[in-house]
Amino acid sequence: MRVSVNHSGGPGAASEPVRRATMRDVAALSGVSIKTVSRVINGVPSVSEELRDRVTRAIARLDFQPNLAASSLRRTDGATRQIALLLEDVANPFSATLSRAVEDAAREHGTLVLAGSLDEDPQRERELVRAATLHRVDGILLVPAGPDHGYLHREIRNGTPVVFADRPPRGLAADAVLSANAEGARRAVLHLADHGHTEIAFLGDGHRISTAVERLAGYRAALAERGLPERPGRAVWDLSDPRSAAEAVAAMLDSDDPPTALFTAQNLVTIGAIRTLQARGLHGEVAVVGFDDFPMADLLMPRVTVVAQDVAGIGALAVRRLFERIAGDTSPPREERVPTALVVRGSGEIPPAAGRWSGAGGSAPR
Amino acid sequence: MRVSVNHSGGPGAASEPVRRATMRDVAALSGVSIKTVSRVINGVPSVSEELRDRVTRAIARLDFQPNLAASSLRRTDGATRQIALLLEDVANPFSATLSRAVEDAAREHGTLVLAGSLDEDPQRERELVRAATLHRVDGILLVPAGPDHGYLHREIRNGTPVVFADRPPRGLAADAVLSANAEGARRAVLHLADHGHTEIAFLGDGHRISTAVERLAGYRAALAERGLPERPGRAVWDLSDPRSAAEAVAAMLDSDDPPTALFTAQNLVTIGAIRTLQARGLHGEVAVVGFDDFPMADLLMPRVTVVAQDVAGIGALAVRRLFERIAGDTSPPREERVPTALVVRGSGEIPPAAGRWSGAGGSAPR
DNA sequence: TTGAAAGCGTTACCAC
DNA sequence: GTGGTAACGCTTTCAA
């Protein structure tokens, strides 16, 4: 029972890490079997008060910390109490908010979260999924980057449940929690139309990203609903960052037939668009409604009207579903839609500056 | 060698997870010993071409994925290829940026990151540190919430290195990577003074948070350097969120002797201050320099002058140090300081609106 | 170059 | 109630 307490070596001796105490050490010190120690740690009731006490004291004395990895290795359910959260980029506001919601829910299950950024790279998605399964996470929450998720069949079959958030699975039946993208986009564009705009542009991110596709559908539905034509060049895709969005807006404004209102279908696109409008002094002239709220939206001038997603709600719902799967739920995969909310702040209520509409033109709102 | 491939059960039969293939299965299928399989997987060169081939094929056929936990359990170094990143809140911009930098560096070491939010709660810090050690992470990167870190002695002695980021350890000698807080704050306040301000307020977050203390020291140093008096009530503490900051600014503006410039010593404080100035139409009158940049700072009106921290740099340096420790470095703990940069954008160059200073008053810059 | 056996720290099974 | 023994999936040691 040699469980020496480190006296921090001799002079110059880099204090070697002491061997961690094991259940064996605890058992020896408290004079019980290793199995009893296990019982105490796992809160099994059938242990006498006295033994429980002795064991507890030994644990404290040795600073024993059970090895979760060893435990999960032996356990029947093999749970590691870790889930993986794979998303676009932990540094962007959407992902960061999602991440926090997931962490909070996971905490209630005594589970830690391994977060990984995919940067819209399908290969990275597969790498990180693989890394996660190598670590035997209990489940994976995925905001996918890739266009096809058939490869996940194997992981799911191997017992790692996967739940999709924000974007649906393709080539695979799996749970998904998504925003009501089409409906939210439709409301945004109707809002602009109802403020007199007939020339409304669509600016979206990657054309292969399902959310962008759905939001475009909503945009089109709204135009159709108001009997507005879809002009060529009015819908622009693949704006992956604020810079490309800013350039796209600049190009539109330079065209023969510039839009009087913009529907920006993603966070960073909205920011890029605003940057161009500000640079040209048009932020009071051109109306903007963005999809997805962002931190300073209500401090800009004008304040930015957005279709806000319930990001935390998406995360909470998705992680709940994931834990249901982890708990053994084998019901058919479900898709859940989380509603959006139009947040009116100013930029979306700017009337058309000139031209086709007969309403008040020109002046920016105060 | 019964390693059935799942044919997705009968109707209604919830497809039970197939038992995962183990090295044993691979060994059996390829007709070699389990040890040879281990050699192939770990890239040990002393395996004949032919056996290597047979094993590789069996691995692919069985979709074998080595169990990292089991491996780490037996390995001499016990590495789990996981580190914990414990910080304020994964959802705030500072933490999110840090998180991303850490993730990128960890990836190069084939290591996954367990992220956890502390919410400035010392107890949560200890809980999460404990959770991390239960999972036997290879190391911990900590932006501490608590005032004392003596409890970490034990973890470090037990072989889990800890590196501090953004805030130094107390009651413990450990590596730390910090911003040059005092110097950055000093530059900010000198900048305001050099634009004619003599009435400069300090607005900081928690008074027990070391960064806030250091930034106040910088503020004072700058005042002293310019021969400016420190007026009572000019320095306010414990502004934990934008709302409380907004209220503090409102109170200051309502006082007999309102400041003409604000030095906001933290992100969220800056945002709260701006909110109040905007609400009162004073954003063109009262100068503001914030500590720590934030996403939309250059889109606000006026654009916000800040002392930018090199957050990614802090993360990169800290995680590098951590991996050095993990690799066995036993040199004495070091403190590294990462320089800040003054980013001039407009809000910090507004001259005093009235009163004591003889320069141009009143008008906001264009 | 290859393999048999022991063991990492824990839990499961089955006796007592 | 309590404990021995086997086993989880892998690496290590040592022998062939």
Image: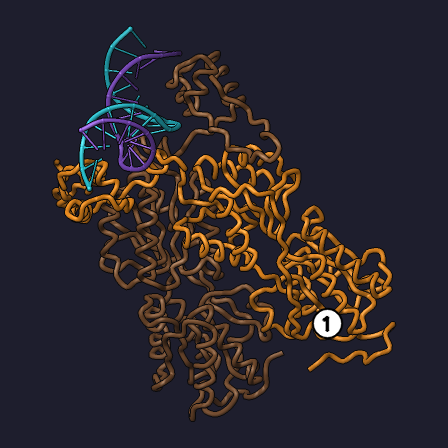
Chain colours: A orange, B brown, C purple, D cyan
Q: Is residue A119 visible?
A: no
On the image, the x and y values in percent for residue B152 come to 25, 52
Q: Quadrant of residue B48?
A: top left
B107 is higher (above) or lower (below) than A104: above
B88 is higher (above) or lower (below) than A133: below
Residue kind at label 1, given as amino acid type: Leu
Q: Is residue B2 visible?
A: yes
The chain holding disc 1 is A
Q: Name the residue located 56 percent from the left edge and 32 percent from the top edge.
A: A154
Given residues A177 and B287, the one toward you in this image is A177
Left or right side of A340 for A2: left
On the image, the x and y values in percent for residue A285 come to 75, 74
Disc 1 is placed on an element classified as loop
Q: Which residue is mark 1?
A: A282
Mark 1 Cα-neighbour bin, 10 Å: few <14, some 14–19, many ≥20: some
Q: For the C terminus of chain B, which image quadrant?
A: bottom right
Q: How many marks?
A: 1
On the image, the x and y values in percent for residue A346 come to 67, 75
Q: Quadrant of residue B339?
A: bottom left
A79 is higher (above) or lower (below) than A110: above
Given residues B127 and B95, the one toward you in this image is B127
A133 is higher (above) or lower (below) than B333: above
Given residues D2 and C4, the one toward you in this image is D2
Left or right side of A119 for A258: right
On the image, the x and y values in percent for residue A124 come to 56, 40
Q: Name the residue located 51 percent from the left edge and 52 percent from the top edge.
A: A320
Q: Quadrant of residue B150?
A: bottom left
